[in-house]
Image: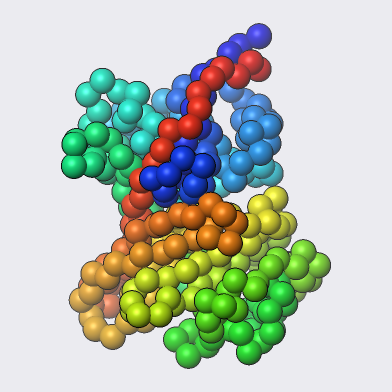
Amino acid sequence: MASYDFVTVNVFTDERFGGNPLAVLPDANGLTDSQMQAIAAEFNLSEATFVLPPDDPRHHARVRIFTRQHEMPFAGHPNVGTGFVLATMAGDPPEHYTFEEIAGLVRVHILRDANRRISGARIAAPRSLSIDIGLPVEVVAACASLSPDDIATLSHTPLVASVGTPFVLAEVASVEALSRAAPDVSAFRSASGQFPTLDGRIALYLYAWLPGDERRIRARMFAPLGGTAEDPATGSAAATLAALLTSIAPGDNLDLSYAIEQGVEMGRPSLILASAVKSGEGPVSASVAGSCVPVSRGTLVV
């Protein structure tokens, strides 16, 4: 039997047992697709990452990301956490890593605290913003166990957008309404049948503006059909939201940042620092950053 070392970290937090937990296998060479999927299911976390040699020697690694049920083309907290783990394991880590993933190349910048200790990472989404279909307010509200009046539509109606992984983005009228939201699995199944282009993987990212700060946001993410009833921190969704909000903000040349709280209702508070850049009529690019805390390490026997 083969054995593989693993590390777990909490991502988008500076407190142990906060944020979003992640399992990282720093050397997954030799594992099959089915073994990776089984290992991710065994950890039973939102995602697990598997680090492999890059296809192109100019890059640092090929990173594969698995949820409990399927492989992801790109995700936020797995990249932040994997960059943090690789950097802390290296004697003299580079300032940047480049990861090969299904969605494209992911650039990872290692962050350090005031004492020059590695504290987290900032990642650039592999794709610019793309906007797909819209979803009726009634459908989104039903999925979140809310009333249609709880969904705000002044800035944008609910829609599917992506910077590497698609999400349904919807603004909620208040933080109070957001706190009342809960995933309704039957409504998600119904929506999946109505919108087959989503391939049955409806990831609903709800957000509300926090009072007193125009760019501070509270968010929640539900994806029960993919095995995640609620996610405590979703970096790829935060990057997508930052790109969408920047795309619709007045002005042609903007570089905007957003502080996004998530996981509060789950008791796993997270803070995602998301930013996006648009220039004229060109594409909108996004990035997310956050801190990480190591939690455990061990050996997995396969």
Residue drawn at x 64%, y 30% as measured from the top left? 39
Residue 158 in sight from this viewpoint: no
Q: Quadrant of residue 275?
A: bottom left
List the single residue furthest toward the top: 1
Image position of 178 with respect to 272: above or below: below
The residue that appears at 34% across and 67% down in the rendered structure is 258
Q: Is residue 22 above or below residue 289?
A: above
Q: Nearer the viewer, residue 42 or 161?
A: 42
Q: Position of 199 compared to 3: left or right?
A: right
Residue at 37%, 71% in the rendered image: 216
Query: Looking at the picture, how far across and down is residue 144, in whole percent?
Result: 68, 72
**Residue 89: x percent and y percent?**
35, 23
Q: What coloring was used for the rendering?
A: rainbow
Q: Residue 297: x and y, percent?
A: 50, 23
* In this view, 194 is above or below 73: below
Which part of the image, by quadrant, shows the C terminus? top right
Tally of numbered tags: 0
Which residue corresponds to the image point at 58% horizontal and 74% vertical from the top-left? Answer: 178
Q: Is residue 277 left or right of residue 165?
A: left
Look at the image and tell me whether residue 46 can be seen.
yes
Residue 225, quarter of the rendered image:
bottom right
Q: Percent x, y for residue 51?
A: 46, 29
The reply, left or right, for residue 57 in relation to residue 193 is: left
**In the image, residue 138 above or below residue 208:** below
Q: Which quadrant is home to the N terminus?
A: top right
